[in-house]
Image: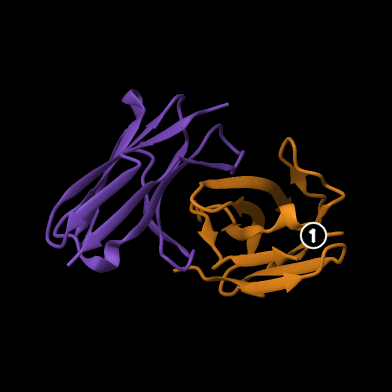
Amino acid sequence: GIQVEQSPPDLILQEGANSTLRCNFSDSVNNLQWFHQNPWGQLINLFYIPSGTKQNGRLSATTVATERYSLLYISSSQTTDSGVYFCAVEQGAGTDKLIFGTGTRLQVFP
Amino acid sequence: GAVVSQHPSRVICKSGTSVKIECRSLDFQATTMFWYRQFPKQSLMLMATSNEGSKATYEQGVEKDKFLINHASLTLSTLTVTSAHPEDSSFYICSAKGASGLYEQYFGPGTRLTVT
């Protein structure tokens, strides 16, 4: 099956710093989503981005489907950005199943 | 955005008993619901996919007789962990996807199950 790897696995930042999280996938995909899992376990939808670039406030994401990777940019990080960031891909039309990546654990300190 | 709820948020049960977890889509009709399991500091693992009115499709290695899934309506799916054992202790998360035109999955807040 498809492999979804994220890097780095852990990231520690001081408030105000910028960061880039990467998601590599081993096969072509129909759908890619980025999520933030907060310390209480809730997954929050960040982006639905099978291709192209999107921005939402301090966050932006880019997916280059032909090269099988996606990037999540966090600018001016805040302590509330702490948590685990997952990318998840849907492979094959009509499957609907999301395969989650390995995750990046982000800690932002004041 | 679309809202998905889960109940209970936390449950402790004795070994050998059964536990039911509910997943509801509050403001949209979910044609498909998914159940995931997450162990501490690990990623989410898909357990099964359920479509309203039909039998659930289980992922390889997931015991369908142990994890009973019912998707009785377009807004409700239930997961019943039967004859629970301590190794079933985990964080269970559901997600829901709407009809065509709604491409994203939306996730519930999760249920932490502890089996003693």
Residue type, mark 1 in image: Val
Residue depicted at x 36% and y 51%: A105
Chain corresponding to orange in the figure: B
Q: Please state which of residues A22 and B41 is positioned toward the viewer in this rendering.
A: B41
Chain corresponding to purple in the figure: A
Rendering coords of residue B106 (x, y %) = 52, 60
Q: Is residue B32 left or right of residue A19?
A: right
Residue depicted at x 54% and y 68%: B109
B23 up-or-down from A73: above or below: below
Rendering coords of residue A91 (x, y %) = 53, 33
Rendering coords of residue B23 (x, y %) = 66, 68
Residue count near mark 1 (Cα–Cα under 10 Å), binned few <14, some 14–19, many ≥20: many
* SS for dot 1: strand
A86 up-or-down from A2: above or below: below
| Circle 1 chain | B
- Residue A65, by quadrant, is top left
Q: Please state which of residues B87 and B28 is positioned toward the viewer in this rendering.
A: B87
Residue at numbered disc 1: B81
Rendering coords of residue A36 (x, y %) = 39, 57
